[in-house]
Amino acid sequence: MKNLSSPEHKIYNIEDFKTYEVEIDFNNPKVAAEEMLRIVDEVESECPFSKAFGVSGTGEGVVWYVKTNRNEVKFKTKGDKHEGKRGDKKKTRVPIDIERVNSMNELVDTIVGDGRLQQGFDQLRENNLEFSRKSTGFYVNWVYADVLKEDLDTIMGNGFEPKEVKGVICTKARKYFFEKLDSGYGL
């Protein structure tokens, strides 16, 4: 994706601009949180994207993509000037319960194994759907529905609601689906 851009058509690749990287030690996340706040303050004082085009101005925040081999996670941090934009109400920060997130990821890893993910491909065949990205929605929805049909009691028994784990399940299914397609599976 690094080469994907077309400046003459005003299509730019974020990789061509200043990016930030922070390593999070979940045993001591305060250090990373402080570094993220420092970066947000820097962006808020001068937007690096606008600056690349010769425009000076306030940056709104930073979108973070978490690199893990489990799931794709992204979130945004904003500076003080942009916190209260919605109806002038200050957002209440919700602390992240790392243990709960880890527990959810472990649960999803347990109930969404390769066997179930492979069954999703069987469903594509049975429904005469092509093995392509066009079938992503069907595949991901089938996996999620199958998890609810077979493991709703396990999800609830572990203290989660289906809507809480849906994103993690769907992300895992989509990632698996794309990896199989990219490897030429089914061709």
Image: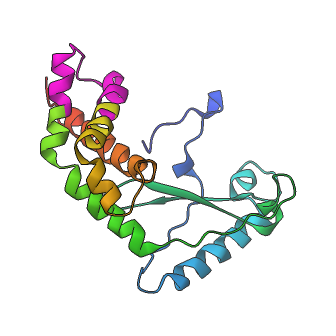
x and y, in percent, of residue 133 in the image: 33, 26
Q: Say which residue appears at 14% left-offset and 31% top-offset.
A: 185
Viewer-proximal residue among 186 and 22: 186
The total number of labels drawn is 0
The residue stretch that appears in magenta: 120-140
Give the quadrant of the N terminus.
top left
| Most common SS among magenta residues | helix
Viewer-proximal residue among 24 and 17: 24
x and y, in percent, of residue 136 in the image: 34, 29
Residue 58, quarter of picture: bottom right
Q: Say which residue appears at 28% left-offset and 24% top-offset.
A: 132
Q: Is residue 38 above or below residue 46?
A: below
x and y, in percent, of residue 73 in the image: 45, 56
x and y, in percent, of residue 17 in the image: 59, 54
- Lateral position of residue 58 relative to residue 104, left or right: right
Q: Is residue 93 above or below residue 148?
A: below
Q: Say which residue appears at 60% left-offset and 34% top-offset.
A: 11
